[in-house]
Amino acid sequence: MKLIIVSILTSFLCLGCDSKTNTADIAYFGGEIVNPKNNYITIYSKESERDTIPLDAQNRFIYKFDNLKAGLYHFTHGGEYQTLLIEPKDSILIRLNTNDFDESLVYTGIGSKKNNYFIKAFLNDEVVSKQFYKLQHLEPEIFEKSIYTAKQQRLDYLERFALEQETSPLFKKIAEASINYSYYTYKEKYPFGYFGNNKLIHYKDLPEGFYDYRKDVDFNDVSLSGVYSYNKFMDWYFHNTALKEYYQDGNHHKFNRQALDYNLEKLRLIDSVIDNKTIKNYVLMHATKVFVYNSASAEQSQSMVDSYLEKSTNDDDKTYIKNLANSTLSLYKGNKVPNIDIVDFNSNVIDLHDVIKAPTVIYCWSSNFKFSYRNNHYMMKSLKAKYPNMNFIAININDMNTTSWKKTLNLLKYPTENEYMFKNPNEAIQKFAIANSQKVLIVDDKGLIIEANTDLFSTDIEKLIETTLVME
């Protein structure tokens, strides 16, 4: 079956090629989506506008790049995304099943081998990332040896791959950068895990030369701006280097990630270290978003936003941050939870306020993160058994139609009585200041917010529930 699909699409690609056309800067991207969440995919890069590609009746698509700029592109479907490298003359075909997005993704066609390499590397990175939480408690020399060995093994594999396959300099550059910046990221994260918040002041006692690799970092390489590990490194580098000013005057002892002076220093460093506007705007926006999302102070949020607005040159990002700040203000303790349309399992559209008739835990979840929503639903079930007077509702934030959402619930055999989805996910993400895949709010029986940004696995969750119930 897969061969038939590839054959059909390859023939279609050939029909789209004019023998008289200069194909030097043309490429194609096509494929099939199994169990689609909606009827389109989108594709974009950091330097290009988002383009929508419709699926046909067989859930297939085809897209032609004219005047292609070689580099990393992102394609998204149903709230999930993946990265691919596209170069002139590529004809890349994919087949993926949304029930297992990353693991099922397979590339075929011209340009497929390099992208299958990246998928394998991406899945391997997820495994290594989980191992880091054990390694971060090792002594610095042992930690360094462990991650350096892992880095060299990946570089050796890349070298063998490049010898066996015909690869471009751009591929080699991006592949090497992905490996090196993953290694750099683990080094930047290390002191936060090793010392912990109470002893992070000792970060400066790490062995001499621990951060020697920083002299090799290019903070302005826009060709790497789509590389996940490059962006992740930027995030942790400024987390780390802002510590110098944070501990400079002796006012701080226990580390507080939400300290305003620490976060303003991060913005100052980002602005002074990065020159490229594309990269600078992204890193500034991300740092500001995380602070505002977690802030419980309107005054501090405004200070952070003001500093950000002085430094960013991206008008769309500025609008997003200002809207996010306004949304977080409406979610402060004591305010009434925003009202919005939700859809129940029988496809009835209901006001959120009408569902809240008792103290309630509202858990937002995404069907794109299976490990997360399985664990969180299990925790909800456990908390519900322990606190029968507390209402628990789950709201899906990403499915675009009830069919996909219901299929997920039926597959996992979740009770459907307290399961909902947002009628308009984009509106909900803005109203509820949802900055990642999940959000948990606790409200009283009148819908007044007790806590707007907790976690089902937080050590405080039971205390918050008990406090809410006592208020009844």
Image: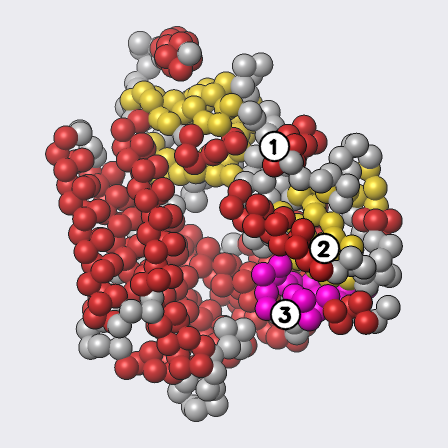
In the rendered structure, find residue 411 and report the number of the disc placed on it: 1
Q: Which residue is mark 3?
A: 460
Labels 1 and 2: the sequence-earlier one: 2
Going by the image, does 83 lie left or right of 398?
left
Q: Quadrant of residue 91?
A: top left
State the quadrant of the N terminus.
Answer: top left
Which amino acid, mark 2? Lys
Q: Viewer-proximal residue, 378 or 114?
A: 378
N-term mark: 1 or 3: 1
**First in residue order: circle 3 vs circle 2:** 2
Residue 216, position in %: x, y? Answer: 21, 61
Q: What residue range appears in magenta?
A: 447-465
Mark 3 neighbour density, 10 Å: few (under 14) some (14–19) many (20 or more): few
Query: The residue under label 1 is which amino acid type?
Result: Leu
CA gap, disc 1 to disc 2? Answer: 22 Å
Q: Which residue is mark 2?
A: 384
Residue type at numbered disc 3: Asp
Q: CA distance from mark 3 to mark 2?
A: 16 Å
Q: Looking at the image, which residue is at 50% across and 18% down?
A: 60
